[in-house]
Amino acid sequence: MAEVSLADTRKVFGTHTVIPELSLSVPDGSFTVLVGPSGCGKSTLLRMIAGLETTSGGRIEIGGRDVTAVTPSQRGIAMVFQSYALYPHMSVRDNISFGLRLARRPAAEIDGKVRRAAEILQLEPYLDRKPAALSGGQRQRVAIGRAIVRDPGVFLFDEPLSNLDAALRGQMRIELLDLHRRLGSTMIYVTHDQVEAMTMADKIVVMNAGRIEQAGSPLDVFDRPQSPFVAGFIGSPRINFFKGGIAESRGGDMVAVRPEHLRIVETGGRWRGRIRLLEQLGTDTLVHVTLTDGDEIVIRAPRMGPELQDAQVAIDCDDRHFHVFCDGQRVD
Amino acid sequence: MHSSRLRGYGLYILPTFLVLATITIVPLFVTFTVSLFLIDVTSGLPPVWQGFYNYVSLLSDSRFLNSLVVTAELIFIPVALQLLFGLALAICLRERLAGTRWMRILFLLPAVIPPAVSGLVWKLFVIPGAGGLAWLSGLLGIDLDIDLLSMPATALATVVVASTWVGTPFVALILLSGIETIGKDQYESATLDGATWWQTHRYISIPTLAPIIRTVVVFRILEALAIFPIIFVLTGGGPAGATEPVNFYAYVTGFDYLQIDYAASMIVLFFLAMMAFCSPFLVQIARSAEGGAR
Ligand SMILES: Nc1ncnc2c1ncn2[C@@H]1O[C@H](COP(=O)(O)OP(=O)(O)OP(=O)(O)O)[C@@H](O)[C@H]1O
Ligand SMILES: [Mg+2]
């Protein structure tokens, strides 16, 4: 159990500044997801918390203790890597107990911890196998088991599910949330998949180019994006942006509306356009429309037939669904 | 079906098989035949059948027995040292310690220099009073004016050093390519688990490299006798046979003393001993290669 706080943390590789200056507080017991586009510094930040990268400036505290200069193994953290990082020549049991054996814990304690982790992760039947004889999902569980036996205050995950197929990813997502509820430890989870971020987090941290764009609960970030970047990054399909008169009339230079808040209407409407493409999702239909001014927008509408292809339509939305931005900041 | 498939494979293998047979099996067979006859090349008399007489004599030939001991020393000590240094260098190169980037190229040098030249280099290096060694020890303020090659123990040590020097780069490069297949994450994960530098290599690098180490050792053992030119140049087998391995004794017997049949019997015995020693390893390597392919 531990909170993590970063104060003015910086990271520079040579002359390349990856994280200019970043402060973040991760509450004790939270499931915090760091999300952002590729190369924005998520892994670097996580590795700094783990102690695998040195910090170029600032402080890192875990559980109230300044760990900026503490070696990785003494920070009270455990990390699960995207590649699983299992040792191929060791059995599952030996992989899980590696750290405990290095620390020369008593055999009974090691055995008990391995058994508990194996039970939580349903790995009992595989304890004597080598990693090569496991499926991707099972390997992932072994990697998590290796973290569990360390009883860390903080679990760090770096894109742990990205090597799994979609179905397994969905299942492991739920298992990880179960694990979080069961252990109650702080978890920091890195992903570039905003669906993973939305579904798993109790706190989302949206990063862009080494900076925090916005941090908050998933719904808060979704409902009140603080910048066009966050609005565009969170939510699928992507939010629609409008510039020009409609933005100026609301006191900004840009407005955004989510696809599900746009409606196709019989009469009136703010915009007019031609249906370019219909994507059928089953329950809903994604309607791609080319507006008269040439902009492309997406509408998430209740299911509608393919006969509407190329039809001229009018589009509207309620005032309350506009997100207004001025100079890259939200205006209310 | 099965046999026709075998026949198909056989056809592909045949050319290779014929070439291998010509360059290995036929000479062996000829050597063995020669060893069973008394052949006097100086008199021009026809060969006389003498059966296994040569082999019986070998067993009481103290120079031969000594050469067996020297052979064992010249195989196992350098190979053990090559493995030790090779592993250490591979690990240093992997960790990109300062200045090691060059080493990859420098390293290949001893491996590509012809062994006879290596022998010469070392001979010049240890020349008393004038060589590089004398110069180095002079720098340290020691007046080293002894001929290392004139005393049995130091002569053997010099050959061991030269042979280690020749073989280490190969071992290091093979182990380096093996060690580079180990993911960075594995080392980092071990670091998080509290492993020290030594423990990460003891429990991760070395076990992962074990199959490669086994293969390399067998090949180095088989290759160790290729130091023949080094001995030829450096010590000529002396002093008093201290650095004379079996193949060198056989060479001297055959080409200096012109006792071709006796030399042949040494080679045959030595071949059998090497095969007996190495074949379990070779079988194991072949097995694991088969297992890996499956
Ligand atoms: N060891 C390093 N040396 C120099 N630059 C580095 C190093 N590690 C990372 N970087 C740079 O830092 C930036 C952030 O990298 P990082 O791996 O943290 O991105 P990320 O957000 O995890 O991306 P992804 O989603 O692709 O994993 C990148 O521009 C990368 O090139
Ligand atoms: Mg990353």
Image (cartoon, coloured by chain):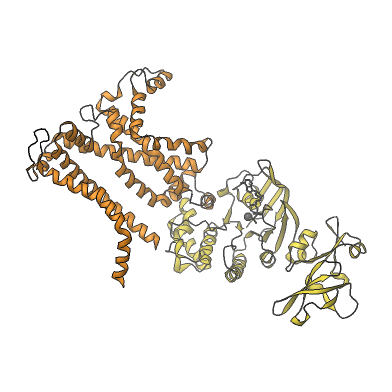
Identify the residue at image location x=36%, y=18%. Answer: B130
Task: Please state which of residues A147 and A244 is positioned toward the viewer in this rendering.
Answer: A244
Identify the residue at image location x=30%, y=52%. Answer: B282
User: Where is the N terminus of chain A found, in terms of image quarters?
Assistant: bottom right
| Image location (x, y in percent) of residue A10 | 70, 45
Query: Is residue B10 at least partly visible in the picture?
Result: yes
Q: Give left or right: position of B92 versus A178.
A: left
Q: In this view, does A110 lie above or below B266?
A: below
Name the residue at the right extreme: A249
Q: The orange chain is which one?
A: B
User: Where is the C terminus of chain A found, in terms of image quarters?
Assistant: bottom right
Report which quarter residue A107 is drawn in.
bottom left
Q: Give left or right: position of B181 versus A5.
A: left
Chain A: drawing colour: yellow
Q: Is residue B36 above or below residue B235?
A: below
| Image location (x, y in percent) of residue B234 | 30, 28
Q: Give left or right: position of A21 versus B80.
A: right
Task: Please state which of residues B176 and B77 is positioned toward the viewer in this rendering.
Answer: B176
Report which quarter residue A25 is drawn in.
bottom right
| Image location (x, y in percent) of residue B102 | 51, 36
Report which quarter residue B117 is drawn in.
top left
| Image location (x, y in percent) of residue A193 | 66, 63
